[in-house]
Image (tube, helix red, strand yellow):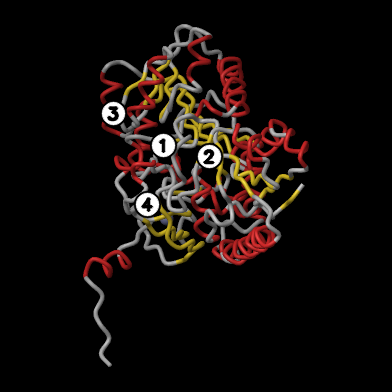
Amino acid sequence: MATMALPTEVSQNTTAKSCRFCGASLEKTFIDLGMSPLCETYPSVAELNRGEMFYPLHVFVCAKCFLVQLEEFESPENIFSDYLYFSSYSDSWLKHCENYTTQMIERFGLGLKNFVVEVASNDGYLLQYFVKKGVPVLGIEPASNVAKVAEEKGVPTLNRFFGVQLAFELVSQGKTADLIAGNNVLAQVPDLNDFVEGLKLLLKPQGVLTLEFPSLLKLIELNEFDTIYHEHFSYFSLLATINILQAHGLKVFDVEELATHGGSLRVYACRVEDTTHALQPSVEALLQLEKKSGLDTIAAYEGFARQVKETKFALLDFLLSAAKEGKTVAGYGAPGKSATLLHYCGIGKDLIQYTVDRSPHKQGRVLPGTHIPIFHPDRIRETKPDYVIILPWNLKDEITQQLQFIREWGGRFVVPIPKVAVY
Ligand SMILES: [Zn+2]
């Protein structure tokens, strides 16, 4: 029997994969999580009978520069123009941002005469603290609904995508930055080289760039596969980050390991020719740790898929037993990462009856794909579920504390990652 030729479009998609940083062809799979809907698109009740687009979550690792990455398949405009993630809804995250502000002001002596820019500034959750201290700021945020909220709080915000073009425009207006902050944005940039080049252009000769992003080492060690979703195009080790920044005339002079988002890195960089910032020993220490874990060899990236599959089976075992025993399971939170977890594991309304979220923008909607309904957190007190599964497991301490009242009816918490834990 003759083999049918694949349609041109499909064969092009499977052959034209190249690294978004170095351009080498992508052949090594890091993990293939199957098909998933766009995770920050929460359908409303009126949209329940419509179809939803699913996209592949196939992650590759570049054998040349070790950048772990997804292919780009949806235009960033479609993903981010009406983004429902309002950063300001987590207490611990806001505390983190306030601390960052204090640290930066003290360490780099920022004041009234300086200028702080944040790329992907969301609803002004971070810059509001600089505004309070009188430091001039500019937020850059592509999602118009979120940018509007920032403006209303008194955080000047440009509703644009950031890259070389916008950096040129700002520089030509005399706007260069003493500090540029990029929190959890690097992963979401489709044109990585244009973005990083833009950061360099916008930076004053002695300016500082800080980038925060989830650590790839932690992602592997702590099995955080649900942090892989379509909005995250790239996953960074310090090793890969140093190479990328260096290619654009920037050098890393300090790095901190943070507990946020399941283990993040905060990288401090400046222009390569800038000698005012001394190289801290933390950089070499973390590089050695990454090398010890083999992140500079392709072998370290293999084996991740196996541990992820084990987690899926354990979570399904737990949920199926609970369902058979007639126990009720509610979710807490509707984070983007829940879409990956639920789709990869094949979990629907039959296993988790509903979830709740503090964000009023998500309440009354449903989770993408699974259509698990999202309610106000009061629903938990009203329905007294036997188990509450914490979907944003990175906030488990905060959420467990807020929800201690479930103990009144013998309720228990479930955390799916790194390993299924019931307590
Ligand atoms: Zn590469």
Tag 2 near tag 3, CB within 8 Å: no
Residue in the picture at 71% in, 36% down: 400
Alpha-carbon span between mark 4 and mark 2 = 17 Å
Q: In this view, does 260 lie to the left or right of 159?
A: right
Disc 4 Cβ-to-ligand 1 distance below 8 Å = yes
Q: In which quarter of the image is residue 214?
A: top right
Q: Residues within 10 Å of mark 4 (few under 14, many from 20)?
A: many
Disc 2 Cβ-to-ligand 1 distance below 8 Å = no
Query: Ligand 1 is found in which quarter of the picture?
Result: bottom left
Tag 1 near tag 4, CB within 8 Å: no
Disc number at residue 166? 3
Q: What element carries label 1?
A: loop
Residue at numbered disc 2 = 213
Q: Residues within 10 Å of mark 3 (few under 14, many from 20)?
A: some
Marks 2, 1: nearer the viewer: 2
Percent position of residue 265, x then y: 58, 38
Percent position of residue 129, x then y: 53, 15
Marks 1, 3: nearer the viewer: 3
> Looking at the image, which is closer to me, 388 or 124?
388
Tag 2 near tag 1, CB within 8 Å: no
Residue at numbered disc 1 = 249
Q: Quadrant of residue 114?
A: top left
Alpha-carbon span between mark 1 and mark 4 = 18 Å
Disc number at residue 93? none
Disc number at residue 20? 4
Query: Disc 1 marks which amino acid?
Result: Gly
